[in-house]
Image: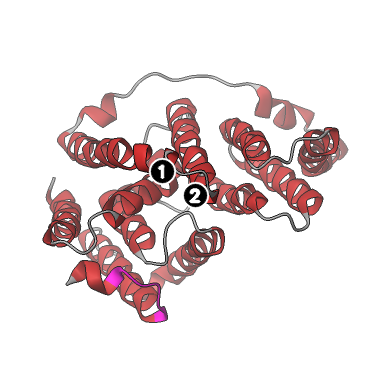
Amino acid sequence: MLANFFSKSKPVNFIVLFLLFLTYFGVTLFVNNISFFSAGKEVFLFIVVFSIYNFIIVKNEVTFDNSFAFLFYVLLIGFFIKNIDINTIFYANLTTLLFFRKVYSLQSGKNIFHKLFDGGMWLGISFMVEPYTLVFGFLLYISIFLHNRLSYQTLIIPLLGFFVPVFLYYTYCFWYDSAETFWQLFSWKITLDFTLYSTPYYLFSIFFIGLFTFLAVVIKTPKALAVLNRFRKNWILILFHLFFSGVVFFLVPEKSGEAFLFLLFPISVILANGLELYQKKWFADIFILLFIIASMIEFFL
């Protein structure tokens, strides 16, 4: 029943999933004794994130015509919402989503140079918010290669787009005699203290989500690579996206759990593609129910 409901991409699905998010969000506010009406800014920003995410999924056909990816995106947020604040990591995730929108849109041959410049620009903005997101720049060039857009122009234009906001930020810092603030963007310090993630709360989430993500990759990859089509390229790009998201997750110095936001996009898409193989069987309903129950259990760990 659940799989049948989300097997199509309809406006009502977006509404239902947004209500599911509000449930997670409301329970979190209740636990923290915060008034729901005082959280309007947070709700608005999540609506923006959901809209960008859904646009990327629907426009670029990284899944079939269904709402599974958006469903898992909301469910994954439910796992970590207790530790998500509107701070640097959140805004970095928002700007990288705008960057990913350009990365996945390269499959279309329209306005390639414009997309590459915009992609570089959003990466530059994301770099200023969270320097370690610069790693995602590799994803743009992998997309260029996969979609046969390789030329000297396509190699240079993203760098120009990246340079523009970064240079403007440098001139701002220089004008106000705070150039040291700018140069700190390039001072990367890797922190390997993952003690927080050894707690039952995070161990349960990491094991549960990691297990099903691994199974989805193993099941879907042979089928995706067996056919020479657009989705094959998207699937390879998603796997690289997961890898680079993992790299950013480990590099970000704030080990507070919020860095999991960078992993939600590729994991939700991978889980959705794994579920698509069984969407007309009872297994799909159990799969979704397991994620819903597990996300609820997290509130008590």
Query: Looking at the rendering, in which quadrant would you find the C terminus?
Result: top left
Residue picked out by circle 2: 231
Q: Nearer the viewer, residue 235 or 299?
A: 235
Pointer 1 or 2: first along the chain: 1
Tell me: residue 42, above or below residue 133: below
Mark carried by residue 16: none
Relative side of 39 to 110, left or right: left
Q: Quadrant of residue 166?
A: top right
| Mark carried by residue 224 | 1
- Circle 2 Cα neighbour tier, 10 Å, few/some/many (<14 / 14–19 / ≥20): some
Q: CA distance from mark 1 to mark 2?
A: 7 Å
**Which residue is drawn at the image coordinates 23% and 42% (left, top)?**
212
- Eyeballing the image, is 93 above or below 110? above
Inspect the image, locate mark 2, and give the three-letter code of the amino acid beneath it: Phe
Quarter that holds the N terminus? bottom left
Q: Which residues are magenta?
A: 6-11
Across and down, in percent, residue 233 comes to 54, 42
Q: Please tell me whether residue 14 is drawn above or below residue 27 in the rendered image.
A: below
| Residue 215 lies in quadrant | top left
- Up the image or down, 297 lies above or below 259; here it is below
Quadrant of res 169: top right
Percent position (x, y) of residue 172? Answer: 82, 42
* Residues at circles 1 and 2 in contact by the CB criterion of under 8 Å: yes
Q: Residue furthest bottom?
A: 12
- Furthest residue in direction front, as rendered: 227
Callout 1, which amino acid? Answer: Ala
* In magenta segment, residue 177: no
Residue 152 drawn at (x, y percent): 84, 32
Q: Residue at 40% of width from left, 77% of height from top?
A: 10
Q: Could you tell me what secondary structure mostly forms the magenta stretch?
A: loop
